[in-house]
Amino acid sequence: MRCSIKGCPGEYEKKTIVHTVHQKGQVFVFEHVPAEVCIVCGDTLLAPDTIRHIEALLKRKKKPAKMVPMYEYA
């Protein structure tokens, strides 16, 4: 599929990405998220089912698989 960004000649490719969600002052990081990524400009599309799955994971408030340090750029 052609990239939806005006003027970009790229095509979307299926990849897995790291996706972050900012919610209520917290940052959640999801690895191995399926996405369509433009090979030229990097525009990223998530399928509606993928978004619903991420939202369901956030609602469950299950213990994360990993904890990572987070630094504030001051």
Image (cartoon, helix red, strand yellow):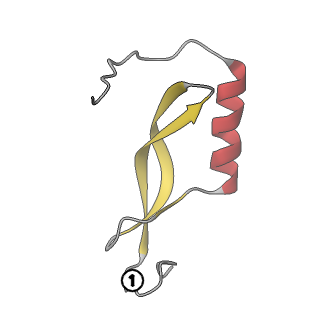
Instruction: Identify the residue at image location x=52%, y=78%.
Output: 4
Q: Relative to residue 13, is residue 18 depicted above or below?
A: above
Residue 11 at x, y percent in the picture: 41, 78
Q: Relative to residue 12, is residue 62 depicted above or below?
A: above
Q: Relative to residue 47, is residue 31 depicted above or below?
A: above
- Which residue is at the front of the view, 6 or 55? 6
**Left or right of 59: which side holds 24?**
left
Residue 55 at x, y percent in the picture: 69, 36
Instruction: Identify the residue at image location x=63%, y=26%.
Output: 24
- Which residue is at the front of the view, 67 or 70? 70
From the image, tell me which residue sits under label 1.
8
Query: Please, what is the three-letter code of the amino acid marked with disc 1?
Result: Cys
- Which residue is at the front of the view, 47 or 19? 19
Residue placed farthest to the top in the image? 63
Instruction: Identify the residue at image location x=33%, y=70%.
Output: 39
Residue placed farthest to the left in the image? 74
